[in-house]
C-alpha cells in the first residue's frame, strides 16, 4: 500500500527480496506476516521467520530514530584520522544489541564498535550501528542502520533502515 516503511510491520505483508542460494537470482516476493512464507520455522520450535524479520525491522527503525537526536555528539578517532566513532555509534549499538540478544540469545555477535568479533558456525548477528559514520558526523544525512543475521557463515537475513528517508530494505536468502 501507500503506508510508510515504518508501518511495514503492521501491514498484512511486506515486500522482500529473496536470493536463490544456487543461482544468486534475486526475486521479489511478498512475505505474508500472518502465515505462509513467514510462518516457516527455521530455528527450532520457538522461532519463526516472521518473528525474526519483525524484530530486526523494529530494532533498525528504533535505532534510526535514536540517531536522529544529534544533541551532544562526541567524535573520536578510532585508529587513524579517517576512521572515527561517535558517541551515537555506541548508543545505537547498545540499543540494537539489547534487542537482538533477546530475539535470538544463542546467536553470537559481530558489531563494529565491539572488540569481540570472532565467531564460529551457527547464527551470528552482524551490526553496523551507523553505517556511514563520517557522513553522520558531518550531518550529511547519508547514513543508515545495518543489521544482518548469518547462518553457518552465510548471509540469511538483512535489514537496512535509512532514518532520513524513512525507508526500510529487507533481504532474505531463499
Image: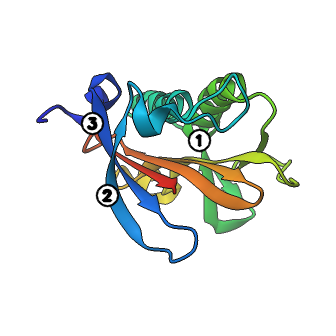
* Residue 133 placement (x, y as % from top left): 51, 54
Tell whether 116 sits left or right of 25.
Answer: right
Mark 3 and mark 1: span between their CA atoms?
23 Å
Circle 3 — which element? helix
Mark 2 Cα shell of 10 Å, populated few (<14), some (14-19), many (≥20): few
Q: Residue at x 65, y 39 (%)?
A: 42
Which residue is denoted by mark 3 in the rendering? 5
Query: Residue at 71% of width from left, 57% of height from top?
Result: 78
The residue shown at (77%, 56%) is 152
* Disc 2 to disc 1, C-alpha distance: 32 Å
95 with respect to 71 (left or right): right
Question: Splitting the image into 4 quarters, where does residue 99 fall?
Answer: top right
- The correct choice, above or below, for 9 with respect to 162 in the image is above
- Name of the residue lying farthest toward the bottom: 23
| Residue 92 falls in image quadrant | top right
Q: Looking at the image, is mark 2 or mark 1 earlier in the sequence?
A: 2
Could you say where residue 12 lies in the image, as x and y percent from the top left?
27, 27
Q: Nearer the viewer, mark 3 or mark 1?
A: 3
**SS label for mark 1:** helix
- Asked if residue 141 shows in the view, the reply is no
Residue that carries the numbered disc 1 in the rendered image: 89
How crowded is the residue under tag 3: few (<14 C-alpha within 10 Å), some, or many (20+)? some
Number of marks in the rendered image: 3
Disc nearer the start of the sequence (3/1):
3
Taking depth in this image into account, of 147 and 150 the one nearest to the observer is 150
Q: Measure the C-alpha gap from mark 2 to mark 3.
A: 16 Å
Residue 92 lies left or right of residue 15; in this view the side is right
Q: Which one is in front, 71 or 165?
A: 165
* Spot occupied by residue 69 in the image (x, y as percentages of width and height): 40, 29
Residue 28, numbered label: 2
- Identify the residue shown where x is 88% and y is 54%: 120
Amino acid at each position: 500500500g501507500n503506508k510508510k516503511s515504518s508501518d511495514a510491520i503492521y501491514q498484512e505483508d511486506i515486500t522482500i527480496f529473496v536470493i536463490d542460494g544456487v543461482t544468486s537470482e534475486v526475486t521479489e516476493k511478498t512475505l505474508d506476516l500472518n502465515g505462509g512464507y513467514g510462518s516457516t520455522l527455521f530455528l527450532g520450535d520457538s522461532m519463526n521467520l516472521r518473528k525474526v524479520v519483525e524484530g530486526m525491522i523494529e530494532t533498525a527503525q528504533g535505532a534510526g530514530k535514536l540517531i536522529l537526536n544529534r544533541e551532544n555528539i562526541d567524535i573520536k578517532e578510532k585508529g587513524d584520522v579517517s576512521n572515527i566513532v561517535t558517541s551515537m555509534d555506541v548508543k545505537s549499538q547498545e540499543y540494537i544489541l539489547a534487542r537482538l540478544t533477546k530475539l535470538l540469545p544463542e546467536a553470537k555477535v559481530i558489531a563494529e564498535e565491539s572488540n569481540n568479533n570472532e565467531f564460529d558456525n551457527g547464527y551470528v548477528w552482524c551490526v553496523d550501528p551507523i553505517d556511514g559514520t563520517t557522513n553522520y558526523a558531518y550531518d550529511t544525512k547519508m547514513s543508515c542502520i545495518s543489521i544482518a543475521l548469518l547462518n553457518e557463515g552465510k548471509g540469511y537475513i538483512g535489514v537496512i533502515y535509512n532514518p532520513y528517508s524513512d525507508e526500510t530494505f529487507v533481504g532474505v536468502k531463499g
